[in-house]
Image: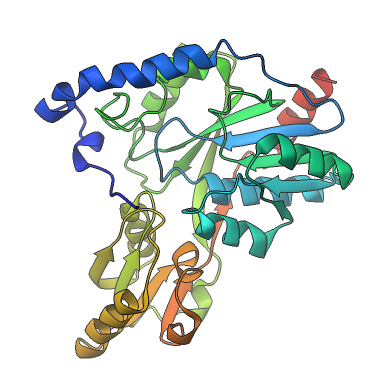
Amino acid sequence: MNLSKPKFWDFKKPNYLAYLLLPLTLFVKASNFFSKLYTKKKFKKIKSICIGNIYLGGTGKTPTTLKLYQLLKKSNYNVVNAKKKYFDQKDEYGLLKNKSKVISLRNRDEIINLAIEKNFDLIIFDDGLQEKKIDYDLKFVCFDSKNWIGNGLLMPSGPLREEINSLRKYDGVFLKVTNTNIDLNKIKLTIKNINPKIEIFDSYVKIKNIETLNLSNKYLIFSGIGNSFSFRETLENNNFNVLEEKIFADHYDYNNQDIQKILETARNKDLKILTTEKDFIKIPDNLKSEINFIEIDLEIPKKDQLIKFIKSKIDERN
């Protein structure tokens, strides 16, 4: 079952509903506390990186994982991506499978053991920072700069899986930038005040296939991702004329009726249809012909510094 993220999670300050739900955050706090008591397993035969989040959904984990895979492959690492198998996250697995080598099983221990068996020397996990049994060699947290930490509260009062002070235990942050009006320095100062040693890397969304799309068209767009506003903002920043938008829950599993309604609306209003690559994967094949998608890439300005940082940490933890 796919649920939409409550809008009040991203208010600048908590509202009455957030405060009403505060007692329920004790369950998240208890889970986070007891997770510290687990003895985490270290794998010596392979190096591991985790790209995760503490803000629930829409932080760019999968594109970041793919970008890091590309960069490390160019740096001559025998690298593989990994995704714990979830029934409702086939879209993310499909994206990883289309663009990289990937292992997906029900258990992250089994994933690592299979990667070792296949002689990979580095594994990148898409998600898994809250894993209780594995000690990764490097841990990165992803944020979208526009949402940042929302109202700053734990679930279900807010969007956080862990309190912001948990950044003390992580190595790096990827900060996705889609809006140039955001005060990035304020966010970075907050991060550095919590963990002065943490490395912060900005990332910028670019549309790889923009030359294949007609900017003079009028578009109906739809998406079922963590932060749909990010999709629309990316399009508008690239001068797409968006006249109508349909938003579905994160990881939404489209059926024929959903897509038929979208097609009918677009035909009636003489609009072209555009969606995300992750959503396109989930559309029934017989209904894809009238739908385009944007293929995104992340630009990391400090990519050389990023690779140097990763290598230094991996060597340090040999």
Quarter-of-image position of residue 309: top right
* Foreground residue among 119 and 63: 119
Quarter-of-image position of residue 312: top right
Residue 74, given in percent of the width and then of the height, sits at 80, 50
Residue 150, given in percent of the width and then of the height, sits at 29, 32
Residue 131 in view here: yes
143 in relation to 247, above or below: above
* Foreground residue among 73 and 111: 111
179 in relation to 212, above or below: above
Q: How many marks?
A: 0
* Foreground residue among 155 and 275: 155
> Which residue shows up at 30% across the image and 60% down it?
248
> Which residue shows up at 40% across the image and 69% down it?
275
Q: In this view, does 177 lie to the left or right of 229?
A: right
> Which residue shows up at 68% across the image and 22% down it?
135
Q: In this view, does 316 lie to the left or right of 251?
A: right
Q: Quadrant of the C terminus?
A: top right
> Which residue shows up at 26% across the image and 89% down it?
267
